[in-house]
Amino acid sequence: MFPGIYWEHSPKRSFPGNLEHYTIYTDREISVMGRRVDGYIELPLPDGSLERRICQFHGCYWHHCPTHFPANEDSGENRFEKTQQLTSLFRRSGYTVIEKWECEFKSDLASDPDTKAYFEAHPTTRTPPLGLRDALAGGRTSALKWYYKADLAKGEKIKMVDVVSEYPNANLRGEYPYGHPTLYLEGDPDMPSPDTWNGVIKCTVLPPRDLYLPVLPYKAKGKLMFPLCRTCVEEENTEMCHHNDPQERQLTDTWCAPELLLALREKGYTLVEVHEVYQYPRTSKYNADTREDGLLSAYVRRFMALKIQASGWPPECDTEEKQAKFVEDTLKHDGVVLDPTKMEKNPALRALSKLMLNSFWGKFGEKTLRPKTEFLYDYAKLIALVTDNTKEVTGLLPLSDECLQVTWKPVEDSEVSLPTSSLLHAAYTTCHGRMQLYKYLDVVKERALYHDTDSVAYISRHGESELPLGTHLGDLTDQIEEDYGPGSYITEFVAGGPKNYAYKVAVGGDVHNIKVCIKVRGISINTSCDDLVTFDNLKVMVMGSRDKITVPIPHQIARLPGWRIVTRHSTKNWQALNTKRRRVDVANTVPHGYNAWTMAPEEDQDLLEVMELLGDA
């Protein structure tokens, strides 16, 4: 277990004198008397002899910790008894044995300030094992520019486009691995070549310094970031990156093969070290020519057909010929077979089929260590629950003389996997979604103003590449024209961070008919706050003239302990905050760690950065 690696470095296992005089074996499990042990130390004694000391770290689950995983008649082999027998054997043979249980060490790490401070100041150099949940990340969401006003005289427009059914499209067209993986650890001579990787990889990479749109996600500060320097993003550095030591910049994380290979092959990332690879025997992908299904495509095609049929015929399909062409195109592009006799508007069926499509992959990644609630009417069941070492009771609430509400959560390593769990395929779904969005971002590059999980706002200019529009899965649609009518476009855009932006729209292309749209996560814009949550106020905060605005929420619905739901008055602080990228000037941002001018003198680099961004704008 990985906590054992930390304990091997623990200051609590101190030794007299200078450690340089000892023979210490802790790099890997070594063999003593033909048995594997976690650590072995030979300490010279004053009489000239050696003390032979064995260090054993016992994982609670694997060694049947008597506190959390006591053996019972259903446990099969009694691992705790075997552990005690081995310890006795070593001691009878003259070895000193120091033991530590995983639960005891975790308690020390959480409650002992000295232990906690030591490991914060001296992080272990060991890399923890690959966890599939570490590869599961969300969508790309970031404000790339704080503010932009289109130069209408030069023919500029701001467009906002959406990806049609991004995650269902990933399930339909994405390539998914399956089967039982082969695990390769660092240094394995049989490690497959990176070009053949098809699963999940834990590795260390060195990002380029000058990539405006980084590829690889990295979790820091509780957020999903896309940095070029680990130190900059973890410290939320607001200055230009001057970290010249690669170890300060390199990222260690777990990524799906398609995203990692894109970064290595095309975007200038360098592979520094491979820690662990899950390589799968097979992959599956939908074949559009033969309509041979991939791993998940049959499910998507079935429910997509229900959704399209329940939407009715599109307005432009007003003749039998156009309807037949629509059915043919849908089959050709998406592999979805439509029944013309069932093309009838049915809002309930459409909502249900859409829910089935969007929630499908999410069940793969559902967490199992979540709190659970039971209502108990029997004293014996209560005693059985509170004395169950695989469950941690977090709350007891009497509801009546006969009923007790008990809240508990599974102890780590004892949770039961759900029949719908498949972390690999959940991780691959979000990976394919991010790559689909990145494909579009890579076309507009520095012209991108903002992007959400499945949308992009960008500057449209004459003579420069436009993002193509379409109606099929994975295509882009013009969100502004859909909402405001043909010919409509954005004239002015301001973003205070992810899920916090506003724009002005020239309705029908008429600059004298302007409408404003503002979206702020966590605030419902209505008559109680529409005089505060405005385009102008967000712009003022973005420009730095105002710190924050307190928005009243007069009728907030809140849940209280005891199954009570109340309506109460509340407030929310609204501010412009974008920590996912580094602000360069009033309008522009770059990724954390971005520095394209490392060859220039350090004192000139900031000026060169601003000049280049102004030129791009």
Image: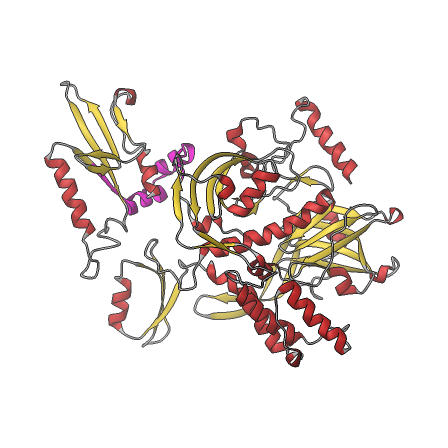
Q: Which residue lies furthest to the front in this view?
A: 290
Q: Is residue 148 magenta?
A: no
Residue at left offset 87%, top offset 57%:
511
Residue 598 to residue 551: above or below: above
Q: Position of residue 460 (x, y in %)?
A: 79, 49
Q: How is the image coloured?
A: secondary structure
Q: Where is residue 203 in the image (x, y as percent from the top left)?
A: 47, 39
Residue 336 to residue 71: above or below: below
Q: What segment carries the magenta color?
A: 98-127
Q: Position of residue 206 (x, y in %)?
A: 54, 34
Dominant SS type (magenta): helix
Q: Can residue 137 be seen in this view?
A: yes
Residue 322 to residue 75: above or below: below
In the picture, measured across the screen, residue 291 lies left or right of residue 601, that is left
Residue at left offset 13%, top offset 36%:
91
Q: Position of residue 136 (x, y in %)?
A: 49, 51
Residue at left offset 50%, top offset 40%:
194
Residue sitting nearer the eye, 262 or 27: 262
In the picture, measured across the screen, residue 530 lies left or right of residue 331, that is right
Residue sitting nearer the eye, 4 or 379: 4
Q: Quadrant of the C terminus?
A: top right
Q: Can residue 146 be seen in this view?
A: no
Q: Quadrant of the N terminus?
A: top left
| Total count of labels | 0
Q: Residue furthest left?
A: 92
Q: Is residue 112 magenta?
A: yes
In the picture, measured across the screen, residue 589 lies left or right of residue 512, that is left
Residue sitting nearer the eye, 519 or 537: 519
Residue 542 to residue 512: above or below: above
